[in-house]
Amino acid sequence: MKPTLILLTSAFVSSAALAQELPTAPYLPLDMALTAAQKTIESCAADGYNVSVAIVARSGETKVLLRADNAGPHSIGSSIGKGFTSASMGRDTAGLAGFIGDNPQNDGLRDMDPRLVIQAGGLPIKFGGALVGGIGVGGAPSGDLDAACARAGLDAIGAE
């Protein structure tokens, strides 16, 4: 007989997320993905940026894509790529860019998959340490501003 391992976890979440039921399996429910995307768009709009935001499932498939009025045509592909990169690599895209830049032996990561976009503006979506997807934002004047908007969206759903 094989031993059984049981893991108990708990997550501390923001008060905004307490009203929502957190996922119990490693996936992101559609309502939470949509809320994160909408809050991201609102955060960027409040600062005067017209962006696109993509929420990408852990599987790599785009779950939600929103484009603000007047967002640039490039912002759609950029947001999807950044979200895909964070979902598949499990890390923020700015950190990944630094990891590659500081370690030339890792430059091959750029060519690993044509869907990867290794620029700031993508963040992994995690609950209780479990990776459930990625969020990508494109269209603000810099990747750091894209990432700040993405963080606002994740905060709205209590993601790490």
Image (tube, rainbow, N blue to C red):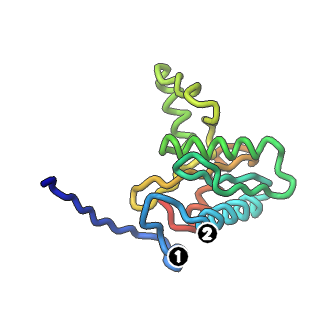
Amino acid type of disc 1?
Answer: Gln
Q: Which mark is residue 31?
A: 2
- Residue marked by disc 1: 20
**Residue that sits furthest to the right in the current view:** 70
| Residue 2 percent across, percent down from the top left | 15, 53
**Residue that sits furthest to the top in the current view:** 105
Given residues 145 and 69, the one toward you in this image is 69
**Residue that sits furthest to the bottom in the current view:** 19
- Local packing at callout 1 (Cα closer than 10 Å; few below 14, some 14-19, many 20+) is few
2 or 1: tag closer to the N-terminus: 1
Does residue 12 sit above or below 121 in this rendering?
below
The nearer-to-camera label among 2 and 1 is 2
| Residue 69 percent across, percent down from the top left | 85, 58
Residue at image position (49%, 72%) is: 14
Q: CA distance from mark 2 to mark 1?
A: 9 Å
Q: Quadrant of the N terminus?
A: bottom left
Q: Which mark is residue 113?
A: none
Given residues 37 and 151, the one toward you in this image is 37
Amino acid type of disc 2?
Answer: Asp
Q: How many marks?
A: 2
| Residue 8 percent across, percent down from the top left | 28, 66
Q: Judging from the image, what secondary structure is the residue with disc 1 in?
A: loop
Tell whether label 1 touches label 2 (CB within 8 Å). Answer: yes
Q: In the rendered view, does 128 fall on the left or right side of 7?
A: right
Does residue 25 sit above or below 106 in this rendering?
below
- Local packing at callout 2 (Cα closer than 10 Å; few below 14, some 14-19, many 20+) is few
| Residue 47 percent across, percent down from the top left | 75, 59
Residue at image position (46%, 53%) is: 131
Residue at image position (73%, 42%) is: 77
Residue at image position (53%, 27%) is: 109
**Residue that sits furthest to the left in the current view:** 1
Does residue 122 sit above or below 7 in this rendering?
above
